[in-house]
Structures are given as structure tokens and as C-alpha cells.
Amino acid sequence: MTINEHLTTFAGLPIVEVDGEQEPDDPGAVAWRIDMEDFEADVSEFEAALEKVLERAGPGGPAALVIGEWGSSYESEFPAEFMIKNAARFSGLRALFIGEMTYEQCEISWINHNDITPLLEAFPALERLWVRGSQGLEISPGRYPALRELVLQSGGLPTSVIRAVSACDLPALEHLELWLGVSNYGGDARADDLATILGGRSLPALRHLGLCNAEIADEVAAAVAAAPVVARLGRLDLSLGTLGDVGAEALLAGQPLTHLETLDLHHHFMTAEMAQRVADELPGVTVDVSGQQNEERWGRYTVCAE
């Protein structure tokens, strides 16, 4: 399974194509999207598109920016230099999505990145950062006091990235979503590598935790069952992975989960009986056990790998 549709909203704002004909009433109340039609577009073309965003968004630049194909993303890392050098012109930027592509543009595990630390440092007021793909992705531990939402979507998230996120000082982070992926595409983490995140001390504001798209979903569920951070979550998301009856049993046998508003387990390999049991034992919790998969036919698989 793959990502085959683009988002229509981001950061609560409707997405408007910078090269489209739509003229929003308030250019500061939309998320502007850049997407190079030519998969091999030169960096200069991408930078020209960023200039156009600045022109259309008005003073302070866009509040939210969605970047799709930047040109040869399957072999060229995200060209962040223009944004970093012109950070003052993007002073209003609060939400950024890098790599919002479908599989037809670039498979998730083929999207190339680099160290995103310079971007975070250039935009200290950034509140939301989403990144799709993890090939070459790096982040240095640091203090990012404004960041409230961090989403890393991957077919295989390296342990080095998880440990770096764990070592960051993120006092305002409310929403953390990590797509752990599979070992064949670099997802080499084990549950122990999530210990700092699950301990919760480094993330005092966390209310939404997603450990998604995981080949080791049963192992993650067992670790989550005893994790201190869970007691203060409103939403727990273990969807898109290979969760089966063993992982679900561990969740139910662990700490109480009845305080949750939402438990998202969609796309799973639980039996129908176990899925129903999870829902029955968590009255008052919105439990999503949709998307039951047939292990006997294909084996277990995550939603996104390649």
C-alpha cells in the first residue's frame, strides 16, 4: 500500500497551489503548495517557485508551506538554502511540510533529505514540521521551544533519527508522530530505542503520540502498555502497522487506557474477536479497529514501506 493522494488541508488551512488560478480572499489564511511538474527541475526553478510564494502570500510570507516535488527528489536532497538565506522574508512561517508527494511522484523510501537542523534553527518560531521520507534524514539534538507538532513519515525511520528526536528539548511539543517502517528500508529501531520518548520526561506537553506504520507493532504495543507517558495522552496512534493479537493483548493487560479520547489501531492483523474485545474493554474511548488485514494471504505488512 502507498500514499496516492495529496493533502487538501495542512495545519488547519486549505491548501492552494502557488501555480494555480485560485486567488484566496486572505493569502495568509491558506497553506501554499509548491510542486515541480518536471521531476528533474533545476534548483533555480524551485527557488523561483518560492519567490512566487512570497509574492502571493504577502508581507511575512506564508503562514503554512507545503513542498512536494522539488526536482529529482529521488536522488537530490531537499534544497533548503534559499529558505534559510531568506528566513527574514518568511517571518510568518509557522507550519512546514517537506516532501508531500504521492508514490507516483516518488516512493516514500526514495525521497532524499539531509540535515534539517539548519532549517529548525533558521525558523525558531516554527510550530509544525512534517517530513515525508527519511533517506539521508538527520537532526541534531537542540532546543526548539516553539515546536508543537512533529511528524516524520517514513517507510523506514533510522534509529539515529529517533534517538536525536529523543535528545531534543521540546517543551511545547503536543503532537509527535513517527512512522517507524520496516527494516528493509532502514527502519532498524527496536522498542528500547523509544524508551526516552515513552518515559515522557523530555516531552512535558505531549498529548498525542503516534508510533505508526511499524513492522514491530506488537513489540511497540508491549512497550507502550507500561510507558509512563501514556497516562497523560489524549490520543494514542498505533495504526498502519502489523499489530496482531499478541500486541493487542499486551495493551489490554498493561496500564488502564480508559482515559484516552482516541485509540487508533486501523490497518491491523488482529482477529475479529480481539478487535471487538479491544473496543468493548475501552468504553468511552473512540477506538478505530477498521482495516482488518488477512495475514494468511500476504503475511503482515505495513501501509508504507518502499
Image (cartoon, grey):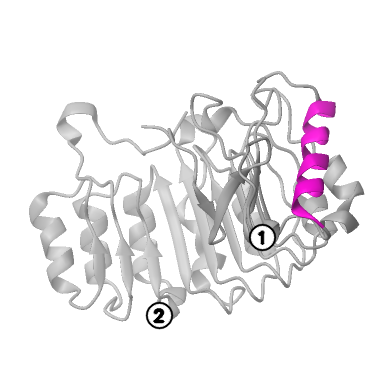
Q: Amino acid at mark 1?
A: Asp
Magenta stretch?
43-58
For the N terminus, the image quarter is top left
Query: Mark 1 sits on what residue?
Result: 26
Residue 134 horizontal side relative to residue 5, left or right: right
Question: Of residues 107 and 29, which is closer to you in this image?
Answer: 29
Q: Secondary structure at mark 1?
A: loop
Q: Main secondary structure of the magenta part?
A: helix
Residue at the image position 57 percent from the left and 49 percent from the top: 15
Q: Quadrant of residue 230?
A: bottom left
Residue at the image position 38 percent from the left and 66 percent from the top: 236
Q: Quadrant of residue 250?
A: bottom left
Residue at the image position 73 percent from the left and 26 percent from the top: 76
Tell me the mark number nearer the camera, choosing from 1 and 2.
1
Q: Secondary structure at mark 2?
A: helix
Q: CA distance from mark 1 to mark 2?
A: 40 Å
Farthest residue toward the left? 273
Give the answer, above or below, for where 63 lies relative to 66.
Answer: below
Q: Sort mark 1 into few (<14), some (14-19) or many (20+) by Cα contacts within 10 Å.
A: few
Picture coordinates of residue 182 (x, y %)?
45, 37
Q: Is residue 140 within the magenta segment?
A: no
Picture coordinates of residue 179 (x, y %)?
48, 48
Residue 198 horizontal side relative to residue 145, left or right: left
Query: Mark 2 sits on what residue?
Result: 231
Verify CB contact (< 8 Å) between mark 1 and mark 2: no
Question: Of residues 194 and 149, which is closer to you in this image?
Answer: 149
Picture coordinates of residue 188 (x, y %)?
52, 41
The image's mark for residue 153 is none
Q: Amino acid at mark 2?
A: Ala
Picture coordinates of residue 83 (x, y %)?
83, 46
Compare marks 1 and 2 and give the one earlier in the sequence: 1
